[in-house]
Amino acid sequence: MYNEVITLVSVRKEQNRFGDLVEVKTERQVFAKLLSIGSAEFYQAAASGMKPEVKFVLADYLDYNGEQYIRYTPYGETKEREYSVIRQYRNGNQLELTCQRGVDT
């Protein structure tokens, strides 16, 4: 069931009126399914320096536009967590987004 609301965040750099490059964030919310990272997947990713923590599945791959970050508030918590998308995997119409904690902008 796709009952989790996540915020997809994209960041791009634009020039302001003074000629400085500034980050512009675009955010939008979508429904997703929350999955755990399997132990085999975790250890394989760790061997290459990644630390996957969570996987979100979107019902339709068209809901994703290459956003680099995800914000999500786990059930029962009040503080939002930020994740970086480290892998996308299309499975039919679904799209799995594997994420690690922290945002490196």
Image (cartoon, grey):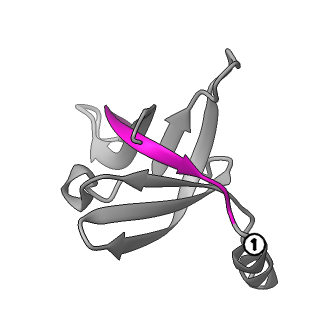
Residue 29 colored in magenta in the image: yes
Answer above or below: position of 12 versus 87.
Answer: above
* Residue furthest to the left: 62
Residue 79 visible: yes
Pick the residue in front: 34 or 1. Answer: 1
Q: Which residues are magenta?
A: 24-37
Q: Residue at x 26, y 73 (%)?
A: 92
Q: Name the one closer to the observer, 23 or 57.
A: 57
**Is 78 situated above or below 8?**
above
Q: Nearer the viewer, residue 66 or 92?
A: 92
Report the residue at 80% width, 78% height from top: 43
Q: Is 34 placed above or below 97 here? A: above
Q: Position of residue 34 (x, y in %)?
A: 54, 46
* Quadrant housing residue 54: bottom right
- Quarter of the rendering occupied by the N terminus: top left
Residue position marked by numbered label 1 in the rendering:
42
Whether residue 105 is visible = no
Question: Which residue in the rendered view is the most extreme toward the front?
Answer: 1
Q: Residue at x 31, y 62 (%)?
A: 94
When asked about the image quadrant of residue 21, the answer is top left
Q: Secondary structure at mark 1?
A: helix
Q: Position of residue 23 (x, y in %)?
A: 40, 40
